[in-house]
Image: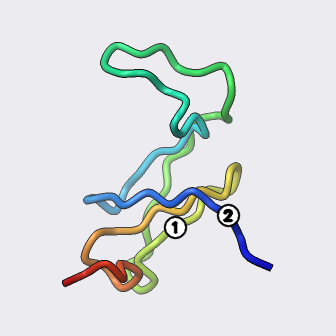
């Protein structure tokens, strides 16, 4: 079974998620009606990622252990 989760690469270990993802427009957007309550998550420095408990989006810290795109 393959999970089809949204992955977001971030620069800081503290992130927020509201489940809106790619629904947003540009600057000055209004939050989407879809999604979930905004939650704040902390990326574990040993794993290098954190998953949102609502929408299962994975946040990966650039340069961390989970960042397989490192050069």
Say what secondary structure mark 2 lies in: loop
Task: From the top left corner, tell me how far across and down residue 54 is, in percent.
Answer: 70, 50
Q: In the image, 69: left or right of 47?
A: left
User: Counting other residues with Cα less than 10 Å from the Cα at mark 1, is it few (<14), some (14-19), or many (20 or more)?
Assistant: many
- The quadrant in which the N terminus is found is bottom right
Q: Which residue in the structure is indicated by mark 2?
A: 4
User: Counting other residues with Cα less than 10 Å from the Cα at mark 2, is it few (<14), some (14-19), or many (20 or more)?
Assistant: few
Write down the quadrant of residue 38 in the picture. Answer: top right
**Image vertical order of residue 47 relative to residue 44, above or below:** below
Asked if labels 1 and 2 touch by Cβ distance under 8 angstroms, the answer is no
- The quadrant in which the C terminus is found is bottom left
Q: Which mark is residue 31?
A: none
Write down the quadrant of residue 13 in the picture. Answer: bottom left
Q: Residue at x 52, y 67 (%)?
A: 50
Say what secondary structure mark 1 lies in: strand
Q: Residue at x 58, y 34 (%)?
A: 20
Select label 2 or label 1 by which is in front. 2
- Please state which of residues 68 and 66 is positioned toward the viewer in this rendering: 68
Q: Residue at x 34, y 13 (%)?
A: 28
**Image vertical order of residue 60 relative to residue 68, above or below:** above
Write down the quadrant of residue 53 in the picture. Answer: bottom right
Q: Which mark is residue 50?
A: 1
Dot 2 or dot 1, earlier in sequence: 2
Q: Label 2, label 1: how many angstroms apart (C-alpha)?
A: 16 Å
**Image vertical order of residue 21 relative to residue 57, above or below:** above
């Amino acid at each position: 079974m393959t999970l089809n989760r949204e992955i977001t690469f971030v620069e800081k270990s503290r992130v927020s998620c509201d489940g809106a993802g790619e629904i947003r427009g540009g600057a000055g957007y209004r939050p989407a009606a879809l999604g979930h309550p905004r939650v704040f998550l902390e990326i574990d420095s040993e794993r290098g990622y954190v998953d949102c408990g609502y929408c299962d989006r994975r946040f990966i810290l650039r340069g961390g252990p989970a960042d397989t795109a490192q050069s």
